[in-house]
Image: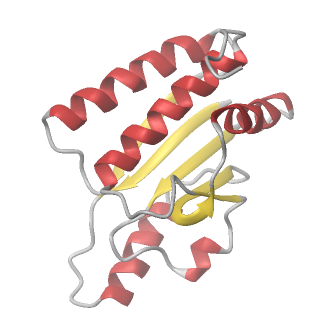
Amino acid sequence: MRVLVLAVGRMKKGAEADIADRYLKRAVQAGRAIGIRSIEIVEIRESRAPDAERRKLEESIALANVIPEGAALVLLDERGEGLGSAAFADQIGRWRDAGQEFAVFVIGGADGLSDTLREKVRMTLGFGQATWPHQLVRIMLLEQLYRAVTILSGHPYHRE
């Protein structure tokens, strides 16, 4: 299985980028042993349209253009389901074991995503009800992906 993290906006250089890179490298390295062939980040340029609806539409079209056909599509949203780390790992493992070729995690822009794209998601995942900056959401997602591959590889999870 391959994992794609699609993010509207760029991660600027600095502490956040360093943390994201660290978790990405760890997840990629640990993932190979359990059948996660790659974890890639694709950044989508933010729309400069003057109104929110047009920005949502343009960003959603750009995202849809890079989502592989048949991917397990997960939207990150504060209204999404809050999964514990073990349940998140279990879901990744079920997709992998079912032969799912791609799991795609989408971090939308500040205005959200179009309803057309939202209708295609298999899961909406949230990291609590608070609104988080996109850079921190990316870090939290990469950390959870790293944690999921370590759980799936049999590494003892500290909460069990």
The residue located at (33%, 46%) in the rendering is 136
Residue furthest to the front:
159
- The colour mode here is secondary structure
From the image, which quarter does the N terminus lie in?
top right
Residue 37 vertical position relative to residue 154 in the rendered view, above or below: below
User: Residue 52 falls in which quadrant of the image?
Assistant: bottom left
Residue furthest to the right:
98
Q: Position of residue 150 (x, y in %)?
A: 61, 16
User: Residue 2 falls in which quadrant of the image?
Assistant: top right
Residue 49 vertical position relative to residue 137 in the rendered view, above or below: below
The number of numbered discs placed on residues in the rendered structure image is 0
On the rendered structure, is 42 left or right of 21?
Answer: right
User: Residue 49 falls in which quadrant of the image?
Assistant: bottom left
Q: Position of residue 58 (x, y in %)?
A: 38, 76
On the rendered structure, is 52 left or right of 49?
Answer: right
The residue located at (56%, 24%) in the rendering is 147
Q: Nearer the viewer, residue 94 or 157?
A: 157
From the image, which quarter does the C terminus lie in?
top right
On the rendered structure, is 52 left or right of 112?
Answer: left
Q: Nearer the viewer, residue 77 or 37?
A: 77
Q: Position of residue 126 (x, y in %)?
A: 55, 56
Q: Position of residue 66 (x, y in %)?
A: 50, 54
The residue located at (53%, 33%) in the rendering is 144
Q: Nearer the viewer, residue 158 or 53?
A: 158
Residue 133 vertical position relative to residue 20 in the rendered view, above or below: below
